[in-house]
Image (cartoon, rainbow, N blue to C red):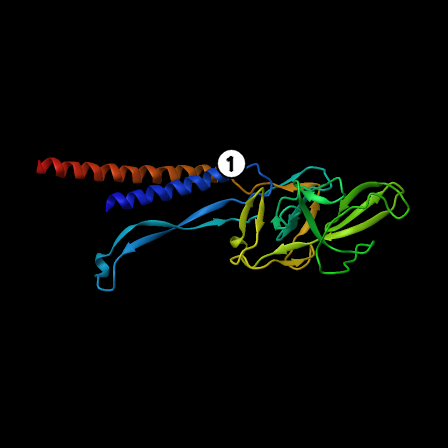
Amino acid sequence: MSFYTSLNGLKNAQTDLGVISNNIANAESNGFKKSSVAFSDIVAGSAFVNPKLIMGIGASVEAINQNFAQGPVEQTGNALDIVVNGDGFFTTKSVISGDTLYTRNGAFEVDQNGYVTRGLDARLQAFPTDAAGNVTGNTLQAVQIPSTNTSGAQFAGLTVSNNGVITASYADGTNQAVGKVALATFLSPGGLRQEGSANWTATGLSGAAAYGEPDQGSLGSLLSGALERSNVDLSEEMVSLITAQRNFQANAKAIDTATQISQTIINLRS
């Protein structure tokens, strides 16, 4: 039984090493959230077994938990690089798949059609507003910048305020609000499914998204001209890496010891 118990330990240590390696690999990925492995023990016994004689038979992976603590903020100077100072996720919608994605990576840009996007096809979702920036509805829509205003002046630039109002500037000096960034929160963010590229999707474990305006209630304000870095602490990960490696080596040593004992018994019988 010691063989299988230690083999189980090797697999668990390998899972731990894999999660830590992924954290380290994404130490420079904007908006990335580190994960950690939680283990639970396995016992073998029934109601008829003396509780003082129940022997454990190893451990299992109970969960791989995501840590959504805020990462450090890096100034970039780009108006469409946005940080959420507090709780909340940006909401984007994929043009190709139609999936709604949630992210903390606020590296946005304007595409050739005037949409504010992240990546190739994920369009930023916002509350509709009037030209003054007052919210006019609760149905989210993609943010699209008109190439010219009503006077025919060309688009000149974009700004995002702390409360999420996106304002387009034009060559004639006029400004026009084109939407207000919507932030999403979840009852259990740990239940969000990772989709890669610092994107998550909602699941039954996370609950449905609740939308609100930045800087209201528990939702954080926005900071334009900066990006949220990964919340991975390399010093912590290196210590965890050494610990996981030691666990792997200890289980391997236990298998080696059990092998030597078995070999000794076989030699005695021969």
Q: Residue at x 35, y 38 (%)?
A: 246
Q: Residue at x 55, y 59 (%)?
A: 207
Q: Amino acid at mark 1?
A: Ala
| Element assignment for label 1 | helix
Q: Residue at x 84, y 47 (%)?
A: 175
Residue 182 sits in quarter = bottom right
**Picture coordinates of residue 131 (x, y %)?**
83, 53
Is residue 163 in view? no
**Against 108, is 193 above or below?**
below
**Against 161, is 217 above or below?**
below
Q: Residue at x 27, y 45 (%)?
A: 4
Identify the residue position indicated by label 1 in the image.
Answer: 25
**Picture coordinates of residue 22 (x, y %)?**
49, 39
**Picture coordinates of residue 266 (x, y %)?**
13, 37
Circle count? 1
The residue at the far front in this view is: 96
Query: Observer-nearest residue: 98 or 248?
Result: 98
